[in-house]
Image: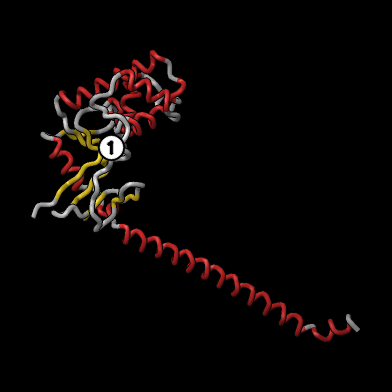
Amino acid sequence: KPWKFIIELFNKGNYIVLDENNIVKIAKNYSIYKDRNILANREYTFPKSRGIDFLNITQDDFNEIFHNFEGELVRILARNINISGVISEEICLKAGIEKNRLGSDLNQEELVSLYNAFKKLRNQLLFGEINATIVASESGEDISVIPFNLELFKNNEKRTFNSFNEAVDEYFSKIDSTRMITPQDHAINQKIKSQEKILANQREYLEDLKKRKDMYYEHGAFIYANFNAMQKLFT
């Protein structure tokens, strides 16, 4: 029976493989949320909708978001329009506004610039030509897969593909298996690290005891060799 491949583009993004019964078999990131969990061998639950539907958002909706929520610009965008952090950064970059600015500090002209940048990206996603790309870091590690070019990654090395599905398949297939361990594996590794730390501390303490033993032995030998002389000092 066919398995399912889920791509979550919000928050930090995620890739999840489900079996025919929607049971999580593999995920890039395992997480526990207030309303759902992504854990190995547990049923996958689709996230509840939050914020404003980015397909229908207007300039007035956009303005209201920044009037009602506090925090950095990039975080307000990601949390309230259901878009990823990467897309939020791209909007800020296109609008020419520092992503770490406080949303409450924006003037109306800046809000209009942000909304226009948002609309261009939205239209590109809905109606533009797909240019599926895998983006690499300076070290050559694949860090993201995107449906079209982003200004944010203009200086990064890239590989293009004929379709977004092909790009996603290539990106996902090369994810290091050590980054896709199950929570049980993670717990075991943490336990091993804890025990290794305890063992290292015990060995260090044992070495200290050996040094003290040698020191006390030398002191004892000195006292024994000079016992008569020392006895006269106290009589």
Above-or-below relation of 113 to 52:
above
Question: From what the image shows, is residue 231 above or below residue 13?
Answer: below
For residue 158, say whether it is visible: yes
The furthest residue to the left: 1
**Is 61 on the left-hand or right-hand side of 175?**
right
Q: Report x, y in % for residue 119.
A: 26, 21
Residue that carries the numbered disc 1 in the rendered image? 49
Percent position (x, y) of residue 46? 24, 44
Q: Residue at x 25, y 50 (%)?
A: 27
Taking the image as drawn, is residue 140 in sight? no
The image position of residue 36, as x and y in percent, is 30, 48
Q: What colouring does the structure picture have?
A: secondary structure
187 is higher (above) or lower (below) than 47: below
Q: Hey, which quadrant is residue 146 in on the image?
A: top left
Residue type for callout 1 = Ser
138 in relation to 219, above or below: above
What is the quadrant of residue 224 in the picture? bottom right
Label 1 environment density (alpha carbons within 10 Å; few <14, some 14–19, many ≥20): few
Q: Nearer the viewer, residue 122 or 63?
A: 63
Question: What residue is rendered at 45% in x and 23% in y?
Answer: 104
Q: Is residue 87 left or right of residue 235?
A: left
Residue 214 on image: x %, y % = 64, 76
Label 1 sits on a secondary structure element that is: loop
Depth check: give the residue in front, 39 or 179.
39
Quadrant occupied by the N terminus: bottom left
